[in-house]
Amino acid sequence: MLSTEHSPSRVFITGGAGYIGSHVVLALGEAGHEVLTYDNLSTGNREAVLHGELVVGDLADRMLLQQTLERFRPDAVVHFAASIEVGESVRDPLKYYRNNSANALNLLEAVRAAGIGRFIFSSTAAVYGNPPTVPVDEEAPLAPINPYGASKLVTERMLADLAAADPHFCYVALRYFNVAGADPQVRLGQDYANPTHLVTRALKTALGIFPGLQVFGTDYPTPDGTCVRDYIHVSDLARAHLDALGYLLGGGESRVCNCGYGHGFSVREVVAAAKRVTGIDFPVAETARRDGDPAELVAASGRARTLLGWQPQHDDLDFIIRTAWEWELKLKKQR
Ligand code: UDP
């Protein structure tokens, strides 16, 4: 394992105004790094950037991207900006290839032109599709079953090919499992206009913002028939990015790492936890499957721990949901 303690560095973050990106910007700022966020604010919020400069720009704007990279001269780039909804990706696949694959190509060309050699990529467990064995490790077959996962896999391939061609370019791709929760100090959380993710939908239903929660499919080959996911607290995921940065700046070579805790919860278990934490028995309806959902995604996460030195702190579903709930209550008070 390489040391993750380094002198302050300059980090360029795409999508730093979004849910996960904003938690990483905050964690980097607290660790003394200098950060520049590049975000088109399509889903992100200006107020979520709690550290460093925000440049409002699109990854398709190659000129602005190039100018900003050359002005800021980062030691590393962390790339979050992407579209992230499985269901939407099935309905509108080209949006995903545009935002996730074509824009990543644009960014990589700009990064290369600016001579930057360290890159951290937000990838996803969706690249595995329906894995043949669970927990799934990084060597499992890459067989996405939805355009979201496929569009992210295109970028992973570009990164691998680029790293093979250029010995000065090194990357870490972090394959996120199901990210949930909010900053434990309630400074940040998820704040999308129309959230689709399970924990957020459940909590907004508890608040009466949505009339009921739908459980998408009860006939999966899982213990209770609903999909199983590995839910990871967003602050632990943020920590993995700092560890990946330390690893790369310490001379680590290109790798892919899962980010999950190594055990899963079914949709029904998450719903029960949301009711327990909130104390609200909100309405739930069991409906048909959602297109593109694999039955079970649980990480084998040993590599992130041994290679990056990742030490998650919040492996506790109720804690994850409690922090998200405190954030939802704060949002409700503000609006
Ligand atoms: N899900 C659900 N109802 C919802 C939102 C999600 O039953 O309102 C299910 C979804 O079908 C999947 C799991 O919850 O099985 C996690 O979905 P989410 O969208 O949170 O994350 P994903 O796994 O798609 O990244």
Image (cartoon, rainbow, N blue to C red):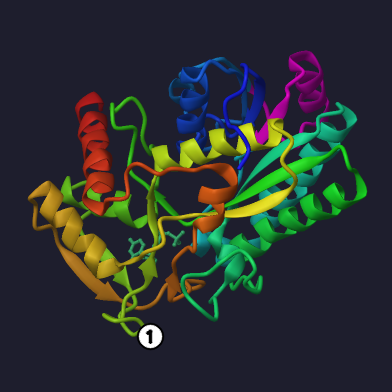
Q: Position of residue 331 (x, y in %)?
A: 27, 31
At 51% from the left and 41% from the top, the residue drawn is 240
Rendering coords of residue 18 (x, y %): 50, 35
Bounds of the magenta segment:
56-78
Please, what is the three-letter code of the amino acid marked with disc 1? Pro
**Residue occupying image coordinates x 40% and y 37%:** 235
**In front here: 266 or 27?**
27
Left of 186 or right of it: where is 150?
Answer: right
Residue 196 relative to residue 325: left or right: right
Residue indicated by mark 1: 221
* Element marked by disc 1: loop
Question: Does residue 22 appear anywhere in the picture?
Answer: yes
Q: In what quadrant does ligand 1 lie?
A: bottom left
Residue most extreme to the right: 165
Q: Image height check: is 95 above or below 68?
A: below
Horizontal side of 21 relative to 322 (left or right) equals right
